Image: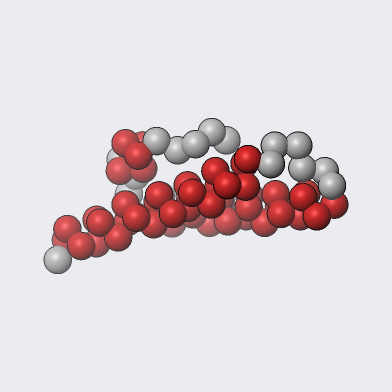
Amino acid sequence: MAQMKIDDIRAMSSDQMEDAILNLKKERFNLRFQRATGQLENTSRLREARRDIARIKTVAAQARAKKK
């Protein structure tokens, strides 16, 4: 999975954002497990997944603030 674009995230509904966060957290867990067992090939994907989660959470917070 490539880095998520901010425009794609802004086009998501809040439910889609929650699903994306959940999927990224699962992926991050699997990547950490692969790293621990020495099977991780793309080490930069850990950082990308972490930043994608933060990006989605930021857009969700902005959307909640905009509604108030």
Note whether residue 19 is visible: no
Question: Is 52 on the left or on the right of 6, as rendered?
Answer: right
Q: Hey, which quadrant is residue 48 in on the image?
A: top right
Note whether residue 44 is visible: yes
Q: Is residue 9 above or below residue 15?
A: above
Give the camera-side residue of 47 and 66. Answer: 47
Question: Is 57 on the left or on the right of 31, as rendered?
Answer: left
Q: Hey, which quadrant is residue 2 in on the image?
A: top right
Image coordinates for residue 40, horizontal then vertical, percent: 77, 42
In the rendered image, which quarter contains the N terminus? top right
Question: Is 65 on the left or on the right of 5, as rendered?
Answer: left
Point 24% across, 62% down: residue = 64
Image coordinates for residue 65, horizontal then vertical, percent: 20, 62
Point 62% across, 41% down: residue = 45
Point 14% across, 66% down: residue = 68
| Furthest residue in direction bottom, as rendered | 68
Point 30% across, 40% down: residue = 11
| Furthest residue in direction left, as rendered | 68
